[in-house]
Amino acid sequence: MEKAETLQEYYRRTCRKMPPDLLEGGGNNAHFNVLKRNNCYASLHFSRKDYYKICLTQGKAVLHTDNGTIAIDKPAIFFSNTNVRFGWENTSPAQKGYVCLFNDLFIGNELRKALSNLFNLFRNDVYSFLFLETEQYDLLSQYFEWMLKEYNSEFVYKKHIIEDFLRLITYTTIKLRMGQGVLEKKVPDSDLVNRFCSLLEKQFPIESPDNALTLKSPADYALQLQVHVNHLNYSLRSYFGKTTSDLIQERIIQEALDLLQYSHWRITEIAFSLGFEYPQHFNNFFKRKTGKSPKEYRSLLLHDI
């Protein structure tokens, strides 16, 4: 498989300042950014990217895809993920709109579900993009502006608000696309997917260090959902492109990050509450996922206060 463009390469190519979270941890940190496209004349070479991108654009351009080339001559929104190749060529200097970038570590379970719904809906189209009427562009532009304002705020829970805005933008695009007469495509056993997501989210947040997770493995979830573990894994992989273990671990690491930042629990207490029998197992798991030990991560947070 060809090499995918990284976020670091994107920032260097576009001559933008490299965000601190990409300078630390060897690229293993969750990353999100939202930027204005003020008269941006930069183009993107045709390739796969290792990040997600949502672009609200106003200005003339050409979108290159594996399925053909599209002339962008009116307001539009497009979404890219890590599985598809695309290229973007601006053909006029007057470019407006917004672009937001984020990696897989940033995506929570509900946002992942929303994005999967969108890409599933667009899977028979040339690409996951949509031309917009003026009032539709103005509505989405307002969402992006609010998201940008929140991104620049100091609110401690701003990540949650940003995820809500991303879901709002995603589902608004789905609604507009379905309004054009496209029927939503069903994925294998979507009811099972929804029940798994609900069961996973019920485990969190963890309210006390004395209450350990009761469901830790794919087999635990399959037993609760009364399905074979292989069927559960097939359904989730079809929907999310990730295994049951991947989704469980992503939710655990997100809870670990929150507990290290917002609680005063000892690291051994956090390890136990997340289902790790030995603190060293938690340390190894956390460092493998983030590039830092739990102690190092908490120290960085305290240093930034």
Image (cartoon, rainbow, N blue to C red):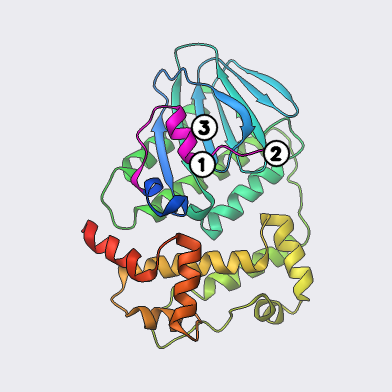
Q: Is residue 228 magenta?
A: no
Residue at 35% x, 34% y is 17
Q: Is residue 67 left or right of residue 280?
A: right
Q: Name which of mark 3 and mark 1 comes first in the sequence.
A: 3
How far across and how far down the image is residue 206, in percent? Answer: 43, 77
Q: Which residues are magenta?
A: 1-20
Q: Which residue is mark 3?
A: 55
Q: Which residue is mark 1?
A: 169
Q: Is residue 268 left or right of residue 104?
A: left
Q: Which mark's residue is nearer the viewer, 3 or 2?
A: 3
Q: Quadrant of residue 12?
A: top left
Q: Quadrant of residue 267?
A: bottom left
Q: Is residue 290 left or right of residue 148?
A: right
- Identify whether 197 is placed above or below 65: below
Please name the amino acid that badge 1 sits on. Ile
Q: Nearer the viewer, residue 206 or 41?
A: 41
Q: Is residue 6 magenta?
A: yes
Mark 2 burial class by Cα count in 10 Å: few <14, some 14-19, many 20+:
many
Q: Residue furthest bottom?
A: 210
